[in-house]
Amino acid sequence: MVFRRLLRKRWVLGVVFGLSLIYFLNSTLKQEERTIHDRTLLEVRDSDHHIQWKVQFILGNSSRQISQCRNSIQGKILLTDELGYVCERKDLLVNGCCNVNAPSSSQYVCKSCLANGCCSVYEYCVSCCLQPDKQPLLEHFLNRAAEGFQNLFTAVEDHFELCLAKCRTSSQSVQHENTYRNTQAKYCYGESPPELLPI
């Protein structure tokens, strides 16, 4: 009862409003400071940022059980490891690398890829992109990347991460935001978008 009477007083409502306004302004300013700090970090990092083109592994034997591999993870049937090997999920070793002795494993596979660097299978796109001779094409792309892509590609540390990011379906692969330009070549590492197929 006393609480209701107190809330009806104008000065109490004024204090509550004032404190809410102060909290809102404080939160907004802190958010702006964080945004400016993040942008500054990206700009500083951007000038020093260099992609590691060579994956450093001590191969030892062909099964590479000493090292750890990153892989494309998402494939239901196929996976690509960071050395460019594509294998079936069942042929993935505990360390994340494809078993190079398995019949399904092949390195730098461009099976479903067209001449423009667009592929119908994501894992083949990543594997093909990892070929050492694709480095000049990727460097050229990075140098010309639009500002909108700069934040994405400055987060990339090496050749493998660049290929993972580049092969994901991008806005270049679609038209009217809801259909693929070419359903047979929707994953691209090249600079050209997929060829537009008639509907």
Image (tube, helix red, strand yellow):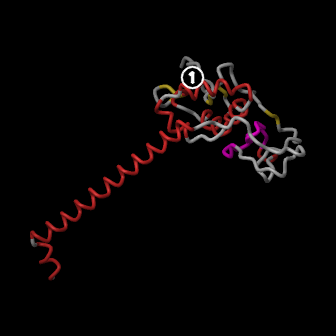
x%, y% of residue 12?
A: 14, 71
- List the single residue furthest toward the top: 198
- List the single residue furthest toward the bottom: 2
Decide if residue 19 is on the left or right side of residue 186.
left
Residue at image coords 76%, 46%: 89
Please tell me in which quadrant of the rendered image residue 23 appears: bottom left
Residue 78 seen from this side? no
> Magenta span has 85?
yes
Decide if residue 21 is on the left or right side of residue 88.
left
x%, y% of residue 78?
A: 74, 40
Q: Which residues are magenta?
A: 72-88
Give the camera-side residue of 61 and 3.
61
Asked if 147 appears above or below 35 in the picture, the reply is above
Q: Where does the N terminus fall, quadrant-wise?
A: bottom left
Q: Which residue is mark 1?
A: 193
x%, y% of residue 77?
A: 73, 42
Residue at image coords 60%, 33%: 166
Decide if residue 179 is on the left or right side of residue 17.
right
Asked which secondary structure carries label 1, the reply is: loop
Please tell me in which quadrant of the rendered image residue 117 appears: top right
Q: Amino acid at mark 1?
A: Pro
Number of numbered tags placed on the structure image: 1
- Neighbours of disc 1 within 10 Å: few (<14), some (14-19), many (20+): many
Residue at image coords 49%, 28%: 146
Asked if 60 appears above or below 127 in the picture, the reply is below
Residue at image coords 68%, 27%: 135
Please tell me in which quadrant of the rendered image residue 81 appears: top right
Residue 107 seen from this side? yes
x%, y% of residue 58?
A: 83, 45
Asked if 197 appears above or below 68 in the picture, the reply is above
> Magenta span has 125?
no
